[in-house]
Amino acid sequence: MIVAVIVVLLFGTKKLGSIGSDLGASIKGFKKAMSDDDAKQDKTSQDADFTAKSIADKQGEAKKEDAKSQDKEQV
């Protein structure tokens, strides 16, 4: 409490008010920039010209190829 009174006496209420409003505006701008980055990241992740395959599909194809090569080795 005493520290707050000393700060007000040193800087004055006008200076503290302007610092507070500047700080609030910068926090608001930061939050907006963070939400814009998330939107851009979602947009760029869907820009591919090909269809994405899941890892499970790729593993299934690899197992089929391994089974075919084992069949060839047995013959």
Image: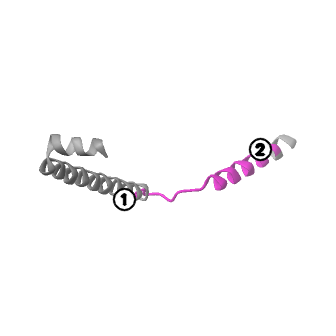
- Please tell me whether mark 1 sits on a helix, a strand or a loop: helix
Quadrant in which the C terminus appears: top right
Q: Which mark is residue 51?
A: none
Q: Position of residue 7 (x, y in %)?
A: 22, 42
Residue drawn at 57 percent across, 56 percent down:
53
Q: Main secondary structure of the magenta part?
A: helix
User: Residue visible at 20% across and 54% down?
Assistant: 21
Few, some or many residues within 10 Å of mark 1 (<14, 14–19, 20+): few
Query: Which residue is identified by label 1?
Result: 39
Identify the residue position indicated by label 2 in the image.
69
Q: Is residue 40 left or right of residue 50?
A: left
Q: Horizontal placement of 25 versus 40: left or right?
A: left
Residue at image position (77%, 48%) is: 68
Nearer to the camera, 20 or 58 = 20
Q: Are marks 1 and 2 in contact (CB under 8 Å)?
A: no
Percent across and percent down for residue 28 are: 28, 56
Q: Where 12 sits versus 48, above or below?
A: above
Where does residue 70 sit, x and y in percent of width and height? 81, 43
Amino acid type shown at disc 1: Ala
Q: Quadrant of residue 45?
A: bottom left
Q: Which residues are magenta?
A: 47-70
Ranked by sequence position, the earlier of labels 1 and 2 is 1
In terms of secondary structure, where does tag 2 sit?
Answer: helix
User: Residue 29, how many percent across, how many down?
Assistant: 26, 54
**Rounded to the nearest whole Å, what is the CA distance between mark 1 and mark 2?**
45 Å
Q: Is residue 58 magenta?
A: yes
Nearest the eye: 41 or 7:
7
Callout 2 amino acid: Ser
Q: Nearer the viewer, mark 1 or mark 2?
A: 1
**Towards the viewer: 3 or 24:** 3
Q: Is residue 41 magenta?
A: no
